[in-house]
Amino acid sequence: MNTPHSGPPGRRDLILAMLRSSAAPRSIASVADELGVHPNTVRFHLDALARAGRVEQVVGDSAGRGRPPTLFRPSRRRDPAGPTNYRLLAGILTDYLADEPDAAAVAAELGRSTSPALLADSGQRRIPTKTRAVSELVEMLAELGFEPEPADGRRTREIRLRNCPFQSLAEQHSEVICSVHMGLMQGALATMRAPIRVDRLDPFVEPDLCVAHLAPVRTGERTLS
């Protein structure tokens, strides 16, 4: 059984491969002739490739009267939908940071400095109640893939996280990854000027559970964003 990765290439992939292997831009008619299909079929696929930014149109030389032909060639830029490997990059950076003497402190600070950009509105805002602050924090964590359990309003003393979006890295370098996570939560609450803070994060309390513990902000501790 063919999979999307192992099966034969589709017609759109064939057209793109033809353009990439050609020394000069190609017309719709020439591509259609080579593939043995109707020009409208080629036009349909070329329009889709152009919308995706994978091919571009150029104007050919006119051989006589009339409009010059429209030709197509591969885009002269990287394919935005091409393969990525952010997992490898994250592993390289995590391995490097893990060798630093203050790896946990640096990782937590990175998380704190990143979290303001992750909030729905990190501009000027009123100081939230504890309930509102917890609600916003849970919403941010849900969007990041932590699958937090619903919090219990004013009585909330912990946030239970049922998923780790960086599970494999956390198993290798929990000191770094868990510190980033704690920093993200601390930074978000500080940006809100919330009356609570994340006091500690207990990772892997259960195979599918990490627990962030909340505590009141101490006098003089609140940071204005």
Image (cartoon, rainbow, N blue to C red):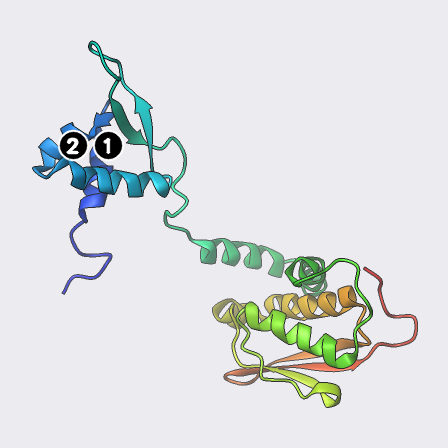
Mark 2 burial class by Cα count in 10 Å: few <14, some 14-19, many 20+? many
Residue 199 visible in the snapshot: no
Image quadrant for the C terminus?
A: bottom right
The three-letter amino acid code for the residue at tag 1 is: Leu
Q: CA distance from mark 1 to mark 2?
A: 9 Å
Point out residue 123 in the picture as x, y percentages from the top left corner. Answer: 75, 57
The answer to whether marks 1 and 2 mark residues whose Cβ atoms lie closer than 8 Å is: yes
Residue under label 2, please give it.
Answer: 31
Kindly report which numbered mark, 1 or 2, lies closer to the viewer in this rendering: 2
Q: Secondary structure at mark 2?
A: helix
- Label total for image: 2
Q: Is residue 114 left or right of residue 2?
A: right
Who is closer to the viewer here, 197 or 60?
60
Which badge, 1 or 2, comes first in the chain's sequence?
A: 1
Q: Quadrant of residue 151?
A: bottom right
Residue under label 1, please give it.
Answer: 19
Residue 7 visible in the snapshot: yes
